[in-house]
Amino acid sequence: MRKQIVAGNWKMNNDTLETAALLDALNAAALPEDVRVMVAPAFTQLTQAKTLTENTAIEVAAQNMNAAASGAYTGEISAKMLLGIDIQTVILGHSERRAYYNETDASLAEKVTTAIENGLEIIFCFGEELQERKDNVHFDVIERQLRVALFDLPASAWKNIILAYEPVWAIGTGETASPEQAQEIHAFIRQLIAKQYDAALAENTSILYGGSVKPNNATEIFSMQDVDGGLIGGAALNADDFLKIVMAF
Ligand code: 13P
């Protein structure tokens, strides 16, 4: 059975004081046992977040990592460094990294390979831009993103893959994909995985939706058959909003 997951991508938000305040508020809540709850703080707050969530069910993920094992890559962080502070999950392929830091399907394939080789779990983000949806090529775009970055992996690697469909036009815009639009894409993705691998693997893969998920739309989106949770940006910075989304299944 695939897992329901709500992950908060904090992006470049929350310094030491803000991280403490937000995690204190999350720790004070009773979380549902059947939902994995994750937060992804900035690199500088990962150790703090690990300490503050010790003995809780809240998991801590990183937002990025480098594909290389080590070397002359100023400003970068390796898989081994993440593992060294007991981070087991990393977000890869976020549209902001693709847009501002030139990450491509091909460079992401390298990061994915490194993460899998190191035993890290990946939340892999992908999704079409507005013009691509208008041009009706969004299915092709999504298929290419998955094929190049993930479909060369052996089936055994997929126990460490969580997918996050994030249509770029819905990120931080207040415009959400309708539940039906999300379901249509999620079902398409599951069918691609079934064709590339097999039906059981497709059924067991969690596919999250991301893009302006808020307390007032989470229940409707999460009720869709192939939507297994959400990757939350803005609403993850507010404890009440994030908790309402965690409870929205
Ligand atoms: P928003 O929820 O702010 O639209 O961000 C979504 C996102 O990018 C999560 O990774």
Image (cartoon, grey):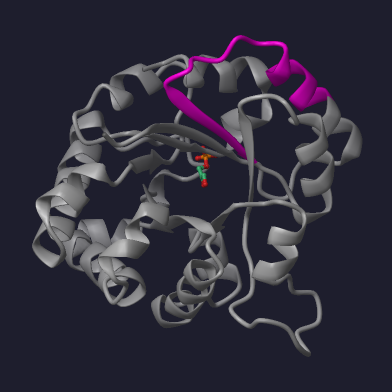
Q: Residue at x 76, y 55 (%)?
A: 43
Q: Quadrant of residue 4?
A: top left
Q: Is residue 136 visible?
A: no
- Residues drawn in magenta: 21-39
Q: Position of residue 2 (x, y in %)?
A: 30, 37
The foreground one among 241 and 131 is 241
Q: Position of residue 124 (x, y in %)?
A: 43, 57
Q: Position of residue 243 (x, y in %)?
A: 57, 17
Task: Tell me if 4 is positioned left or right of 241 in this view.
Answer: left
Q: Position of residue 161 (x, y in %)?
A: 39, 55
Q: Quadrant of residue 206?
A: top left
Q: Is residue 96 above or below residue 215?
A: below
What is the tally of numbered marks visible in this picture? 0
Q: Is residue 218 above or below residue 232?
A: above
The foreground one among 75 and 98 is 75
Q: Residue at x 43, y 56 (%)?
A: 125
Dividing the image into 4 quarters, which one contains the N terminus?
top left
Q: Residue at x 72, y 11 (%)?
A: 28
Q: Residue at x 71, y 51 (%)?
A: 86
Q: Is residue 74 visible?
A: yes
The foreground one among 64 and 197 is 197
